Amino acid sequence: MLKRTDGSYLTVLGSSVGNYRLTFANPDLAVRNESGASVALRKGVLETGNRLYYLQSAGPLKILSQELIESEELLSNPGFEELSGDAAGGIEHCTPIGWIIRTVHEPGGSVTVNAEDGNGTYALNLTATGKGRGVYVFEYLNLTAPGAYRISARFRTLSGSARPYLHVYGTDEKKRISVRKNFDPPVPGKWETLSMDLELPEVPRKAVAVIFGAYGGAGTLLLDDVRMHRLPAAERIRKEDALLLDLSGIPLSSVCRREGGGEIRLSFLKNAYGNRRTVGGIPFSIGENALAARGKKWENAGQSFMDLPDPAGIAIKRIFLLGSAMYCTGEKKGTPLAEMVLEYADSSSARIPLRKGIELDDWYNPGRPPIPAEHRFRAPDFKEYSLFFLEWENPHPERKVKRIGLVPVSASSMVVLPAVTLERRR
């Protein structure tokens, strides 16, 4: 915090390890992001994301509350996509950047790069022989906060009966941390996501090793999509109140047809947030379909609707969406691109506008400064895209919702919502 020559205060604030929700008491607070763009606060609340902010106020900054919504990924190179070594001499001579390989405790064991069977370009083969303590890969982390953490990875059996395990091992001999969880061999040919939770009452003084391994019987396990993140202190929505909709609108495999031929296919959105199960502290599920609104310029222009699971309607408190717009770069900020429609059991309805640059934006626009609640990810073509997290209170919580939909407003744009979660009203 710096005191300026005019008597006001300038505070630089941000977090590289998580998305925090901060509430401020300063009524005159002005906020800008690192690009210099003004950031509007809602009731004095700022969600940090993985960004840096400059806050100017007449008096010293007063923070009323802070809440961790969601941790960023703590492990580097979690998909093993970045390699070091001489690939020209064979991929088997390469290793994943940032990861340390241990095979010395398993005679005949190995850890090699797999360029054929992973979720991305690469994965790792963990081959155990059953003659020792197993093989593993690990990364050292210096943790900066106490609390609950979750470690997870995707395993798949390629051959044999090797067993996967997860292990966190501290390097501080005076306060040794050692938490390990062993698993049965995954069903051959199928990916299994395995996870382990870790509770740290205090910050470790020295680095911890985060370990992913194979042991037990002889065989080869495929390892991919490892993750470690800090869990929020409290959930934003109770598990029993969260209704993750299985959308039935438009197939992601064929969202839209172009004039003159060709299709827009978005099946890869199913992996848009990797091993994550929450965005913005809310659980989401991306399946085979989406709600989509396509403007008049598209060959199969139109809207999409779906019925909720209970024909009598469901009492809804809040609506949460993950979505993006496409082909809207020519539209001005604030222009409505589509509308979310809620149809109630009493035949009434409500519409919620989705505006460019406010609720969402074009999903591919690398020169655009990020907007709040934006989740960026890389597609199979390695380009960076975005999904936007949207949240609303039900305008009529006293009425049961029977049907939801998405209708186009802009003639040239398209809006796609691959995930919708509803919070039940008790």
Image (spheres, rainbow, N blue to C red):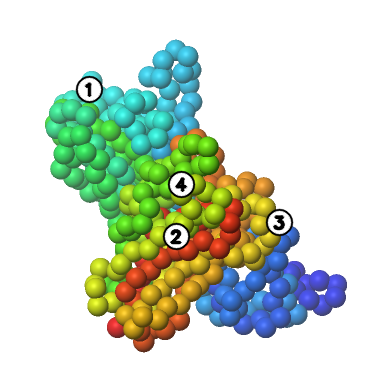
Q: What element carries label 4?
A: strand
Contact (Cβ within 8 Å) of mark 2 with mark 1 = no
Check the image and name the residue furthest to the bottom.
Answer: 398
Q: Mark 1 points at which residue?
A: 107
Could you give the CA–CA distance between mark 2 and mark 3, rounded to whole angstroms?
36 Å
Q: Mark 4 points at which residue?
A: 256
Q: In this view, does 206 lie to the left or right of 226?
A: right
Q: In this view, does 392 lie to the left or right of 2?
A: left
Snapshot quadrant of residue 138: top left
Q: Residue at x 24, y 44 (%)?
A: 192
Q: Which of marks 4 and 3 is in front?
A: 4
Q: Mark 2 points at which residue?
A: 303
Image location (x, y in percent) of residue 226: 36, 43
- First of labels 2, 1 by sequence position: 1
How many C-alpha atoms fall within 10 Å of the one at disc 2: few (<14), some, or many (≥20)? many
Image location (x, y in percent) of residue 341: 44, 70
How many C-alpha atoms fall within 10 Å of the one at disc 1: few (<14), some, or many (≥20)? some
How many C-alpha atoms fall within 10 Å of the one at disc 3: few (<14), some, or many (≥20)? few
Q: Name the residue under label 3.
A: 35
Image location (x, y in percent) of residue 343: 38, 75
Snapshot quadrant of residue 160: top left
Q: In this rendered view, identify the residue nearer to me: 409 or 241.
A: 409
Q: Which of marks 2 and 1 is in front?
A: 2
Q: In this rendered view, identify the residue nearer to me: 410 or 96.
A: 410
Check the image and name the residue furthest to the right.
Answer: 5
Q: In this view, does 296 lie above or below 201?
A: above
Q: Which residue is drawn at 32% across and 74% down?
A: 402
Residue type indicated by callout 1: Pro
Q: Nearer the viewer, mark 1 or mark 3?
A: 3
Q: In this rendered view, identify the residue nearer to me: 139 or 29.
A: 29
Q: Is residue 105 above or below residue 394?
A: above
